[in-house]
Image (cartoon, helix red, strand yellow):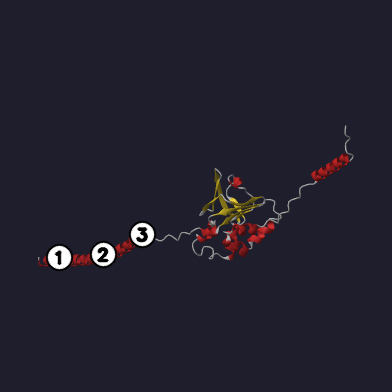
Amino acid sequence: MASSSPLSPILLSLFLVFICGVSAQTAPAPAPSGPLNFTGILDKNGQYTYFLQLLAQTQVGSQVQTQLKTTTEGFTVFAPTDNAFNNLKPGTVNNLDPQQKVQLVLYHVIPKYYSLNDLQFVSNPVRTQAGEDFGLNVTGLNNQVNVSSGIVETQINNALYQKKPLAIYQADKVLLPEEFFEAKSPAAAPSPATKKSSTGSKSNSRASATADEPASADNSGSTGRNMGLGFVVGLALACMGFLS
């Protein structure tokens, strides 16, 4: 019977050491992702040029970016597309004063993180960053979410980013606040019928007054004639009595 080679145990030991070393190695940790970039997410999607301009002009973009580092509630943003802005009447945004532009942008930011599923069960009105008086109505049914400002309503179903503390959803319409976009009804003007009636009443009054004046003159003349006739009759009777 052949004896085993003295090198076999040594080779086997070296092999086992190698296998154990390989098994002990841990997988390399994934490279840490960069800081959350709010405007960078919008820029990457390529159809939010106007909204990005407003975010920069009003400095709301930098404010949200800064607060994302410390917020515990998070943010939910409804981002209007370029088509949404193009569909507005000319001057809708440009005619706003600087403060109104800030409020318009903040009206699209909710100071709390909501997933699409969460949005179906929120209590209305939902407060926005624009202030307590600038609320949104959010309704959901069968995974379909609608957001309304009172004068504009749009469907929300496309999440550009959805990971706490930030959710960004595409909005196909610009959410216009009722507070400074609601059409104010002009002061009620009298209807043509009212004007005509009023004019007719004035004309009738003048006509009545004019008609009454000759009547008064006729009555005075008649009274004068009656008095004169009575005087003549009385004088005649007196003469007759004197002659008799």
Quadrant showing the C terminus: bottom left
Seen from this angle, which residue lies furthest top?
A: 1
The three-letter code of the residue at mark 2 reads Ala
Q: Nearer the viewer, residue 39 or 106?
A: 39
Q: Residues within 10 Å of mark 3 (few under 14, many from 20)?
A: few
Q: Going by the image, does 220 lie left or right of 52?
A: left
Q: Is residue 122 in view? A: no
Q: Is residue 29 above or below residue 210?
A: above
Sooner in the amino-acid sequence: mark 1 or mark 2: 2
Q: Is residue 66 in view? A: yes
* Residue 135 position within the rendered picture, expressed as x and y whole percent measured from the top left: 58, 53
* Residue 224 position within the rendered picture, expressed as x and y whole percent measured from the top left: 21, 67
Q: Going by the image, does 190 lie left or right of 83?
A: left
Residue tagged by mark 2? 211
Residue tagged by mark 3? 194
Q: Is residue 44 above or below residue 232?
A: above
* Residue 193 position within the rendered picture, expressed as x and y whole percent measured from the top left: 34, 59
Sooner in the amino-acid sequence: mark 3 or mark 2: 3
Quadrant showing the N terminus: top right
The three-letter code of the residue at mark 3 reads Thr
Q: How many marks?
A: 3
Q: Residues within 10 Å of mark 1 (few under 14, many from 20)?
A: few
Q: Determine contact: label 1, label 2, CB under 8 Å.
A: no
- Name the residue: 36% across, 59% down: 194
- Name the residue: 61% across, 61% down: 55
* Residue 116 position within the rendered picture, expressed as x and y whole percent measured from the top left: 60, 47
Q: Which mark is residue 233?
A: 1
Disc 3 element: helix
Q: CA distance from mark 1 to mark 2?
A: 34 Å
